[in-house]
């Protein structure tokens, strides 16, 4: 719409240029502030999806599952970290934070260091952090930064369901 109005009021070249600039600004804004979805189990399945979009999803007591919705790079990592910490503070009794990295196609060194700091901070509060479903390049980055053990092993075969099921199997032994 803006491009069309630009073309009508400023001419073809300027109108297209205005539309391109606005598109770039919107793209950068989305990359700088990606969504961080809270996931829950789809009833009757071993699959997890966004709780905000699907209110019937089942949350797991003691487990917070979050999925950043974009690559993690230096200019959005603080936003993602803040969103994660906001959700952790809101969820009292969290023992395990599962980070579903399936939508993170790239991670830079700064973001990997941010995850390390986040994991260390949460572990000091008694919250274990596991990262799952990361793409090969993201797994390589996390391993290269020495974060494999700190983030639950970074196994390419481990899913959100695997980590949640393992947590639930350990619960009776811990309380008994």
Image (cartoon, rainbow, N blue to C red):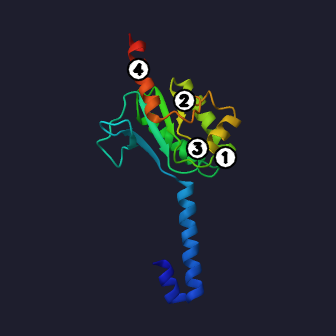
N-term mark: 1 or 4 = 1
Q: Regarding mark 2 in the picture, which secondary structure is present there?
A: helix
Instruction: Provide the residue designation for mark 1.
Output: 108
7 sits to left or right of 41: right
Percent position of residue 70, x then y: 54, 51
Mark 2 packing: few (<14 Cα in 10 Å), some, or many (20+)? some
N-term mark: 2 or 4 = 2
Q: Regarding mark 3 in the picture, which secondary structure is present there?
A: loop
Mark 4 packing: few (<14 Cα in 10 Å), some, or many (20+)? few
Q: Which mark is residue 122?
A: 2
N-term mark: 4 or 3 = 3
Foreground residue among 47 and 101: 47
The C terminus: image quadrant:
top left
Q: Residue 37, relative to residue 145: is it above or below? A: below
Q: Are marks 2 and 3 in contact (CB under 8 Å)?
A: no
N-term mark: 1 or 3 = 1
Q: Residue at x 60, y 37 (%)?
A: 115
Q: Are marks 1 and 2 in contact (CB under 8 Å)?
A: no
Q: For the residues marked 2 and 4, what is the alpha-carbon distance in whole angstroms?
A: 22 Å
Instruction: Provide the residue designation for mark 4.
Output: 169
Closest to the camera, between mark 1 and mark 3, is 3
Is residue 34 at least partly visible in the picture?
yes
Q: Residue at x 43, y 33 (%)?
A: 161
């Amino acid at each position: 719409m803006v491009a069309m109005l630009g073309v009508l009021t400023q001419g073809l070249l300027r109108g297209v240029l205005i539309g391109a600039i606005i598109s770039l600004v919107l793209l950068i804004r989305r990359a700088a502030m990606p969504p961080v979805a809270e996931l829950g189990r789809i009833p009757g399945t071993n699959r997890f999806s966004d709780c905000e979009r699907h209110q019937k999803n089942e949350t797991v007591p003691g487990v917070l599952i979050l999925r950043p919705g974009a690559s993690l790079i230096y200019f959005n990592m603080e936003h993602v970290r803040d969103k994660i910490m906001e959700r952790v503070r809101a969820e009292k009794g969290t023992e395990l934070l599962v980070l579903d990295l399936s939508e993170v196609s790239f991670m830079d060194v700064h973001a990997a260091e941010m995850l390390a700091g986040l994991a260390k901070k949460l572990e000091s509060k008694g919250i274990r952090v596991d990262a799952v479903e990361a793409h090969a390049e993201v797994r390589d980055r996390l391993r290269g930064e020495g974060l494999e053990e700190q983030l639950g092993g970074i196994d390419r075969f481990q899913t959100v369901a695997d980590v949640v099921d393992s947590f639930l199997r350990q619960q009776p032994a811990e309380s008994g």
